[in-house]
Image: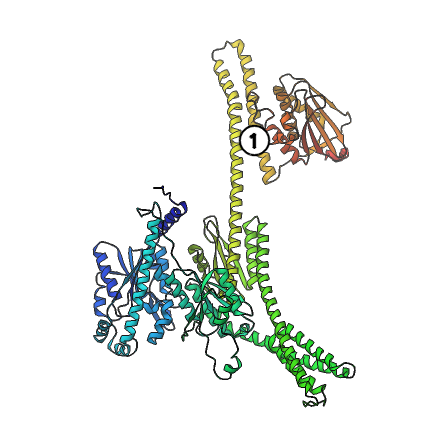
Amino acid sequence: MPETRPDPDALLAQLRSDEARALRGKLRIYFGASAGVGKTWAMLSAARREREAGRDVLIGVVETHGRSETAALLAGLDTLPLRELPYRGRTLAEFDLDAALARKPAVLLVDELAHTNAPGSRHAKRWQDVQELLAAGIEVWSALNVQHLESLNGTVGAITGVRVHETVPDSVLDEADEVVLVDVTPDELTARLAAGKVYLPQQAERAAQNFFRKGNLIALREIALRRTAEHVEDDVRGWRVEQSVPGGNGQGGAALQAWNTSGAILACVGPHEGAAQTVRTAARLAGQLNVRWHAAYVETPRLQRLDAAQRDRILAVLKLAEELGAATAVLTGADVAEQLSEQARRLNCATLVIGRAEPVRGWRRWWGASAVPLARALAQRAPALDILEVGRADSARRLSQASLVATQADEDDERAQSRWPGYAWAAASSIALTLLCTPLTGVLELTNIVMLFLLGVVGVAMRFGRGPSALAAMLNVAAFDYFFVAPRLSFAVSDVQYLLTFAVMLGVGLLVGQLTAGLRFAAGVSTSRERRARSLFELTRELSAALESTQVVALGAAAVQAHFGGHARVLVTDAADQLVPPADPPPGFDAQVADWAFRHGQPAGLATATLAAQPWHYVPLRAPMRVRGVLALCPARPRWLLIPEQAQQLDTLARQIAIALERVHYVEVAQRAVVEMESERLRNALLGAISHDVRTPLTALIALAESLQTLPPEEHTEAARAIVVQAHALHALVSNLLDMARLESGVAGGTVNLRRDWQSVEEVVGAAIRAARPALRGMVVQTAWDPELPLVEFDAVLIERVLVNLLENAAKYGAAPIEVGARAEAGALVLTVRDHGPGLPAALHGREQTLFDKFTRGEAESATPGVGLGLAICRAVVSAHGGEISAANARDGGAEFTVTLPRREPPEPAEAQL
């Protein structure tokens, strides 16, 4: 039997899933067909059992609806006080989310999962509060009725005739760890309703006549049972997948067989009222088949002229599709069937879900009788696709964001203002053409005048679109008939053939206007796409050259603001990984909402489900490694945030900014690492050198000092002389270290205090030779300079130090005699120190300047004393004087060091004395 090896990717996915599951709290939902089946009673009974078993159980919020049996179960259970919120002159009691997070019990009961929170709460819905509790690791129990599921809302409403506005996305139920079905028969539920165990008597009577009819209860019970069975099926499928992973919880590790599905689903969103039902049906079907699904809306030139209310409904349906788990898109084109079939092929969708067309009534039935229905057009263009037509339902979605709805009137005004000038220009163009052609009546043939009128229609269509071009075509036909066709100044015609001319002229005008307006629409779509692509390209190009986070912040905010208008801010974190609010917060900006988006990694504010009343939209800057900050946007057109393409554009811009911030962060980390490595290298070199060059003279000093106790008096002088030599060597070493530290601090972080004075070069050279005599050990030093050498302005102490270090270096690595030279050139003083030794190592050929780096030595052997700071000090001193220092091999052997100092003409003797 062949050996089965575990799949590393499957094992890694299993480990990640187990880790995420361990950190996240569990969700148990008590699910029922309707109110009164006993969901809250079952939940409280289970809570009491858990309490008796020793678990920490806390009541977050429970609605008893006046039922005494349910209220009795609350006795003995810890209850969290509700939070009071003022609203329109009264006080509302709401679930206290922050107190529950602070208390963090083992089990928390949060009833009424579909409840809508009071305005001013952190989240709009209670199920969003539950999501935050689960993320904090708290196990939550809740209750839910079948009519509150978003995908079943329209179906239940059609059955019962009661529309429920508080809904929960199906993903909440699908992701629940446990679903407990609480079920009773319709007869038992009706008996409980009559006994007053569901509602108060006056409410029970109305409910029995409307919602709680036996037919309704049977249908709701069937839906609840089916939905629970689907969840159980998902659990079984998940268990099978877990068992099939080698090395997982399963023992056999057999490979899981592929599931045969019908492919992805594409829901076609239209402008009609029943589009929400189409989306819900597609979500329902996708959940049953366990396939991915998409939603698309095709914007044609005609639909582009919809009013704000209709556009509001379309955006709301697209937002509903996103909440139900779909990937949404807005397509543009003149042919709806072509765009949808192409989108289905692109996404590999096997099933198209469309809404049933509205029945045509009245005169439109005759006018549009020849129009091809969408289903038939789709079948002709994509015969291999399954097309599902959804029945109509009286349900519609509306946007709830006040800030978004507030812009409807402004957009309507803009559309109205931009529409009527086109018709005015159409009439003006017809009048202008008539005035232009009237004097040309005897010069041009009528066919040429017709061409001029058609040219006017083309111009109006290119500039103003279909409506004005159609008006221009009709006005031009009327003007041609009235002013140019005999009898003139009358709509009567002397020749019947002119009727054909009028018809052809009108048809050609309308056709040319239609085609031209279509091209104008396509050009506008291409311009919009090009604008989005250009903004991404420009931002990527500019961010690629950014080297600091401040540059990324400025470039990112400018790019977002240029695309969406309004105001934009990019917030980054500090060294403590805390979000830094702007120094000058703009109006409406809320730093707490931005911090919430940063900590939870989720969008918040405008056009989201979290704190939607905010005028700003907050997007976390999620990079590959972690969240790097928050992008805050207050757009000029808030509705753009609900358009899928614009929302994707914003997400892409935010991702580019986040990646740039992460890149800059790691560049800074790499630079710090390089600096630390260099510091470590220099520290090791210093310790390695000092370990020999400091220990040697110290050991000698200790030995000589101890020998003084045993040596006879006549030998004390020689020992003292040796002590002096070793002390000078140690002093020179320490002096180099201190001088280097002083010069480094001056050159790098400030200025070196130079005591410039007019000095005699001969005297400074002589003083340097005398100071270096202990290190020269009797080596011959020869000097050569011009007798007329002028005075030069420099710091005598530091230049003397340079010459001493060069002489000591020549004594260490060179041979006698040592030559010191000085000469005056135009604007410069040149000092040279040369030895007659082996010269510079061959490895330094072409890299002589590296000799002047810190802790660099000409020879690697440890027998030569020194730490490699002498030449580095020389370069620092010469650079502080504005000069240069170099090293090279002399022509006839040996190494030669050249120091070039800038000079100016010495002053007059009287000035020098001053």
User: Is any atom of residue 535 visible in this view?
Assistant: yes
Q: Nearer the viewer, residue 783 or 860?
A: 860
**What color scheme is it?**
rainbow
Residue sitting at 21 percent across and 68 percent down?
69
Q: Is residue 212 at least partly visible in the picture?
A: no
Residue 775 lies, in percent from the top left, at 61, 20
Q: How many badges with numbers are in the image?
A: 1
Report which residue position mark 1 lands on: 738
Please state, as top left, top right, bottom left or bottom right, where the C terminus lies in the image: top right
Q: Quadrant of the N terminus?
A: top left
Name the amino acid type tagged 1: Leu
Q: Which residue is depicted at the point 40% across and 66% down? A: 120
Left or right position of 494 against 514: right
- Find residue 89 and report its image quarter: bottom left
Is residue 418 shown left or right of residue 787?
A: left
**385 horizontally vs 468: left or right:** left
Q: Residue 76: x percent and y percent?
A: 21, 61
Q: Secondary structure at mark 1?
A: helix
- The residue lying toward the viewer, choosing from 127 and 824, is 127
- x and y percent of residue 716 in the render? 53, 12
Q: For this rendering, which residue is in front, 731 or 505?
A: 505
Q: Residue 769: horizontal and vertical position, in percent?
A: 66, 22
Closest to the observer, 180 or 62: 180
Q: Residues within 10 Å of mark 1 (few under 14, many from 20)?
A: few
Question: Where is 811 relative to 196, above or below?
Answer: above
Using the image, determine if residue 773 lies above or below residue 9. above
